[in-house]
Image: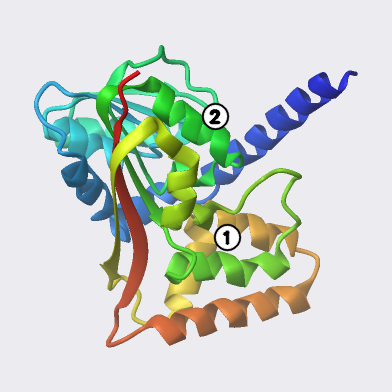
Amino acid sequence: MTETAEAREADRALKAKHRTMWALGDYPAVATQVVAALGPALVEACRVTDGDRVLDVAAGSGNASIPAALAGGDVVASDLTPELLAVGRREAEARGAVLSWQEADAEALPFEDATFDTVMSCVGVMFAPHHQAAADELVRVCRPGGTIGLLSWTPEGFIGQMFATMKPYAPPPPPGAQPPPLWGREEHVRELLGDRVTGVEARRRAIRVDTFGEPEEFREFFKAAYGPTIAVYRSLADDPDRTAALDDALAALASGALRDGAMEWEYLLVTAERSAA
């Protein structure tokens, strides 16, 4: 097997692992019960309006796709994990939103160049392992003058710190894979998009999460519903001591963040205009 063929096979295996991870638990419950406000915030920032052709990359179950369709956009929700798209279809039907759903790899989107007026991603594309490849695809499918909108957890915010807390307990990442919270750094996003965009606006904001009254309630919810957390715990299945240590570490993280029954989870919201071709 040539080096190129080996690299392609390794990439297929990695994407299959990611697809499986995001199908674990109940990510749609996270999207609807915990971070539902994020999608509408991104849609508003992108100024989606009637007739706009919109692509939501790594859309999950439609946290941003459905609000974009309800705002009048002609929306395609794309994601690597078909199980999430299936949930999104049902949710969209229940809410009266009409849009398309397509299984797709954020690093190899199956769309022609300059197809969309708005290309967005809500805490989604940040989890693609190769950041530059994903950013190149976001730019490629956006028309000149169109909008690219990205909402990502910051490294310093609660979810970024959750990933930092889990890192010592997780298997090492594959060679070349980059940490998701890097997308929460303005300079990283600017570097990824480069001079192919203009008018970059980057704002740090926070979502108020009052779903969890106790630290242990947060931990147990994420252990049951959030794919990356479930995957880490599964890797520790034969090590009860490390499992207990991670239990304590996540509870301590949540305890430090809870104030009067609520937490503030910071994210970075970036919008930019695709430069003329």
Task: Rate crowding at label 2 as few (under 14), some (14 to 19) or many (20 or more) other CA atoms within 10 Å.
Answer: many
In the picture, measured across the screen, residue 124 lies left or right of residue 203, that is right
Closer to the chain start, of discs 1 and 2, is 2
| Nearer to me, 53 or 196 | 196
Q: Is residue 121 above or below residue 209?
A: above
Q: CA distance from mark 1 to mark 2?
A: 23 Å
Residue 43 in which image quadrant: top left
Q: Is residue 268 above or below residue 53?
A: below
* Residue occupied by mark 2: 107
Q: Quadrant of the C terminus?
A: top left
Quarter the N terminus occupies: top right
At x 35%, y 34%, the residue is 197
Q: Which mark is residue 39?
A: none
Outermost residue, right side: 1
Question: Residue 218, how many percent across, how many down?
Answer: 44, 72
Q: Amino acid at mark 2?
A: Glu
Numbered label attached to residue 229? 1
Q: Residue furthest left?
A: 50
